[in-house]
Image (tube, helix red, strand yellow):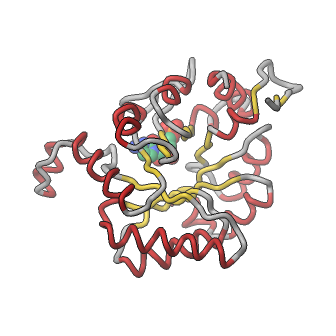
């Protein structure tokens, strides 16, 4: 096991644990995001969301990759199949290795997205990315789904059904709450990826997240990678905070 030794912080952590943690670059201006990612020692993965991408464009993905980082492009594509395919082809050609799509796009859109992502990566000589399906956004509540969208299915059943639809369409994983990970993992064995936000390491503020879980518990529940934002990005010493998240995984 390769161990990353650190001068300034008390923790050491394995390269494998760093691969499991994706730091969300939310709420940062492009320059700030690039300076931040360059500063965190041992960082392997970053998540670029809509806000940063709308400001900085595809260039920011190239710049992060130039820093040696792996990029999760979280733009949650949802459109007609041809447009989903076009967007995923371009995202894969940029070198994004994880890309989100909405499962509600349906099997035709998901299959088109998956096939186009493979083509996009091949066209630039890169590894095929993993597409991740988003099922029910955690901002929805069951009653509101029924009232506003006439969806009477319970959220848990809907998350399972949409994960199954995605897996059948050839999508490589999904984004879910850590509290959904155990049930989904039982239904979708590896290598189907389960990526979980809503993670709080020891001592971190819960903030606006309603249901959180610790890093080691989420991995034990079946998550393959964790998305962590503010506990690292808002920390006084982000390198130290990242190291502590990794060390908590004990892998
Ligand atoms: O700062 P924090 O660790 O709460 O950030 C979590 C990241 O995961 C943010 O990018 C947020 O948008 C995203 N996310 C989430 N909950 C979901 C889906 C995505 O917190 N259900």
Give the quadrant of residue 6: top right
Residue 128 in the image: state x and y as whole percent: 61, 64
Q: Is residue 232 above or below residue 85?
A: above
Residue beneath the point at 17% across and 42% down: 154
Residue beneath the point at 36% across and 39% down: 184
Q: Is residue 33 above or below residue 5?
A: below
Residue 172 relative to residue 154: left or right: right
Give the quadrant of residue 241: top right
Residue placed furthest toward the right: 7
Residue 162 relative to residue 51: left or right: left
Residue 245 in the image: state x and y as whole percent: 64, 27
Residue beneath the point at 51% across and 75% down: 116
Q: Please name whichever residue, 211 or 26, is drawn nearer the observer in this view of the structure.
A: 211
Residue beneath the point at 48% across and 68% down: 114
Quadrant of the image for the C terminus?
A: top right
Residue 148 in the image: state x and y as whole percent: 14, 55
Q: Is residue 245 above or below residue 155?
A: above
The answer to whether residue 163 shows anywhere in this view is yes
Quadrant of the image for the N terminus?
A: top right
Residue 83 in the image: state x and y as whole percent: 42, 79
Q: Is residue 30 above or below residue 20?
A: below
Exactly how many numbered labels are in the figure? 0
The answer to whether residue 51 shows anywhere in this view is no
Q: Please name whichever residue, 83 or 29, is drawn nearer the observer in this view of the structure.
A: 83
């Amino acid at each position: 096991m390769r161990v990353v030794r650190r001068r300034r912080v008390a923790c050491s952590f394995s390269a494998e644990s760093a691969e499991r943690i994706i730091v969300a670059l939310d709420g940062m201006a492009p320059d700030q995001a690039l300076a931040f990612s360059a500063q965190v020692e041992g960082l392997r993965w970053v998540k670029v969301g809509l806000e940063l991408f709308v400001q900085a464009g595809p260039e920011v993905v190239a710049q992060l990759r130039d820093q040696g980082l792996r990029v999760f492009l979280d733009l949650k594509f949802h459109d007609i199949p041809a447009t989903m395919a076009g967007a995923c082809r371009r995202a894969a050609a940029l070198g994004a290795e994880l890309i989100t799509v909405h499962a509600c796009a349906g099997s035709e859109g998901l299959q088109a997205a998956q096939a186009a992502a493979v083509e996009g990566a091949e066209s630039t000589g890169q590894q095929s990315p993993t597409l991740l399906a988003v099922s029910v956004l955690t901002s929805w509540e069951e009653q509101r789904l029924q009232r506003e969208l006439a969806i009477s299915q319970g959220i848990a059943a809907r998350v399972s059904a949409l994960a199954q639809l995605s897996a059948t369409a050839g999508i490589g994983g999904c984004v879910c709450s850590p509290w959904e990970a155990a049930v989904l993992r039982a239904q979708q064995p590896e290598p189907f990826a389960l990526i979980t936000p809503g993670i709080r390491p020891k001592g971190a503020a819960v903030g606006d997240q309603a249901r959180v879980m610790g890093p080691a518990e989420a991995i034990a529940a079946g998550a393959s990678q964790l998305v962590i934002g503010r506990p690292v990005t808002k920390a006084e010493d982000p390198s130290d905070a990242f190291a502590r998240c990794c060390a908590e995984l004990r892998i």
